[in-house]
Image (spheres, grey):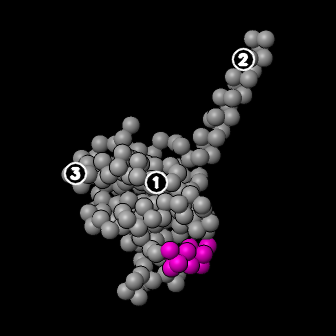
C-alpha cells in the first residue's frame, strides 16, 4: 500500500510541475526585458485616426509600463478587457499590448470592436513572451523604467489583482523603488 501511495504522490507531483510549466508560472519578477523592436499591428488606428504604434524596449525606459499579453480568441483576455480600458485612463503609466499567437487582422478587429486600451500594440515575435515565461494568455506585467519586471499576474486581471498586486507595484515604480514582489 505504501508503494502505491508513493507512486501516486510522484505522479501527482510530476503532473503539477508539468502544469505549472504549461501555465508559464516560472519566476519572472526581477528579470530585465530584452532589447526588442516590435512593429505595429497593421490596420489598427486609434480614436484620432492615427496608426497605433508598435514598440521597442526603449518604450519601457520612457516610464512605468503595464505590459499585457493577450489574444482575441482568449475568453480570459475578453473577460479582463473592461479592466484594461479602465487602467488605460491612468496617465501615470503606459499600457502596452503584446498580441500572442493571434493574427494581426483578428487582433485589430477585436480592438476596433471592443475599444483599444493600449498606447502601443505589437505582435509577439517570441522574444518578450520567452523572456517573461509566457506560455498562455493572458499575462500582465508591471515594468519599471529600467526594464525590470516588478510583478506579474498570470491569468486574467480583476479588481483584486489590480488593487492587491498591480497598483502597489506601479506606485513603487513611480516612486523609483524597484522592489520586486516575492
Mark seen at residue 84? none
Q: Provide the residue designation for mark 1.
A: 157
Quadrant location of the N terminus? top right
Q: Extreme bottom residue here?
A: 49
Q: Residue at x 56, y 79 (%)?
A: 109
Q: Earlier in the sequence, mark 3 or mark 2?
A: 2
Q: What's drawn in magenta, residue-wise?
A: 103-114
| Alpha carbon separation for disc pair 2 and 1 | 37 Å
Q: Comparing marks 1 and 3, which lies closer to the viewer?
A: 1
Point out residue 121 in the picture as x, y percentages from the top left corner.
46, 71
Circles 2 and 1 in contact, beta carbons < 8 Å: no
Picture quadrant of residue 56: bottom left
Q: Residue 103 placed where, x, y %?
A: 61, 73
Vertical relation: 92 (above or below) 143: below
User: Considering only vertical position in the picture, is 171 above or below 4?
Assistant: below
x, y percent for residue 100: 57, 63
Q: Which residue is mark 2?
A: 6
Task: Please report the residue visible at 38 percent of the width from the left and 72 percent of the height from the top.
Answer: 119
Label 1 Cα neighbours within 10 Å, binned few <14 / some 14-19 / many ≥20: many
Q: Nearer the viewer, residue 107 or 80?
A: 80
Query: Dot 3: within a 10 Å radius of its alpha carbon, few (fewer than 14), some, or many (20 or more) residues?
Result: few
Query: Tag 2: Cα neighbours inside 10 Å, few (<14), some, or many (≥20)?
Result: few
Query: Of helix, strand and loop, which one carries label 1?
Result: loop
Q: Residue 57, percent across and down? A: 39, 64
Amino acid at each position: 500500500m505504501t508503494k502505491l501511495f508513493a507512486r501516486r504522490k510522484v505522479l501527482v507531483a510530476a503532473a503539477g510541475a508539468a502544469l505549472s510549466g504549461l501555465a508559464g508560472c516560472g519566476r519572472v519578477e526581477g528579470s530585465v526585458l530584452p532589447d526588442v523592436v516590435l512593429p505595429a499591428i497593421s490596420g489598427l488606428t486609434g480614436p484620432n485616426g492615427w496608426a497605433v504604434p508598435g514598440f521597442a524596449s526603449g518604450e519601457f525606459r520612457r516610464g512605468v509600463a503595464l505590459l499585457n499579453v493577450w489574444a482575441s480568441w482568449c475568453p480570459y483576455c475578453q473577460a479582463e478587457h473592461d479592466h484594461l480600458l479602465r487602467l488605460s485612463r491612468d496617465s501615470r503609466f503606459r499600457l502596452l499590448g503584446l498580441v500572442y499567437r493571434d493574427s494581426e487582422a483578428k487582433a485589430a478587429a477585436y480592438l476596433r470592436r471592443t475599444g483599444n486600451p493600449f498606447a502601443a500594440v505589437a505582435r509577439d515575435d517570441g522574444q518578450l513572451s520567452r523572456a517573461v515565461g509566457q506560455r498562455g494568455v493572458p499575462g500582465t506585467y508591471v515594468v519599471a523604467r529600467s526594464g525590470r519586471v516588478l510583478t506579474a499576474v498570470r491569468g486574467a486581471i480583476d479588481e483584486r489583482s489590480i488593487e492587491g498586486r498591480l497598483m502597489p507595484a506601479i506606485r513603487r515604480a513611480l516612486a523609483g523603488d524597484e522592489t520586486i514582489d516575492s
